[in-house]
Amino acid sequence: KALEIAAYILVCVLWTFGCSLSRSSPRHGYTATVAGFSIYIMVVGTLESFGRKSSSEVVFQRMQEQFAGAVIYITVEMLLWRKSARTIVDEQQITILTAIKDSIVEATEPHLLIASDESEAALLGKSQ
């Protein structure tokens, strides 16, 4: 039993290390974080029911529970909240960037007009 527990600990540490390398990924960071701590949820259940069920039975049961939870969450989100967070964030980002652009134009426009007038005056002065 001690050797099996040591093997679980080693696998958990290696898995967590592998997942931690992907945490900074913009695309897979959240998935890596969840995968990193999910193994402990599965293993703790295995250690709690040590002897009553085989470890593969407990891990498989936990995987089924997590899969069912993910399916239920996605279904509820798709039915109740049709507008995804990505769309809302994109709209907000466009609004913010448009406001920044308008502020920059407003702040620099008087200086651009003065420079334009000066360059026109210089061109007129050279042509005469």
Image (tube, rainbow, N blue to C red):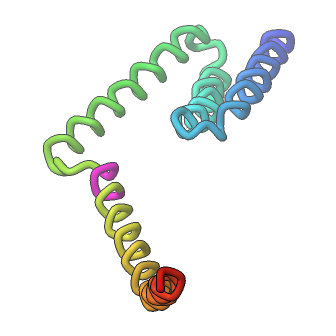
Residue 10 locus on image (x, y percent): 82, 19
- What segment is highlighted magenta in the picture? 85-89
Q: Residue at 56% across / 40% down in the picture?
A: 26
Asked whether, in this view, residue 60 is left or right of residue 21, the answer is left
Residue visible at 63% across and 35% down in the picture: 37
**Picture quadrant of residue 97:** bottom left
Query: Within the image, what quadrant is residue 70 found in?
Result: top left
Where in the figure is residue 93, as x and y percent of width and height?
38, 62
Q: Position of residue 20 (x, y in %)?
A: 71, 34
Report if residue 44 is visible in the image: yes
Q: Quadrant of residue 92?
A: bottom left
Residue 9 vs residue 24, the one in the foreground: 24
Residue 87 within the magenta-colored segment of the rendering: yes
Identity of the residue drawn at 43% across and 74% down:
100
Q: Is residue 92 magenta?
A: no
Q: Is residue 108 visible?
A: no
Please state which of residues 116 and 74 is positioned toward the viewer in this rendering.
116
In what quadrant of the picture does the N terminus appear? top right
Q: Nearer the viewer, residue 28 or 12?
A: 28
Give the residue at the far left of this rendering: 79
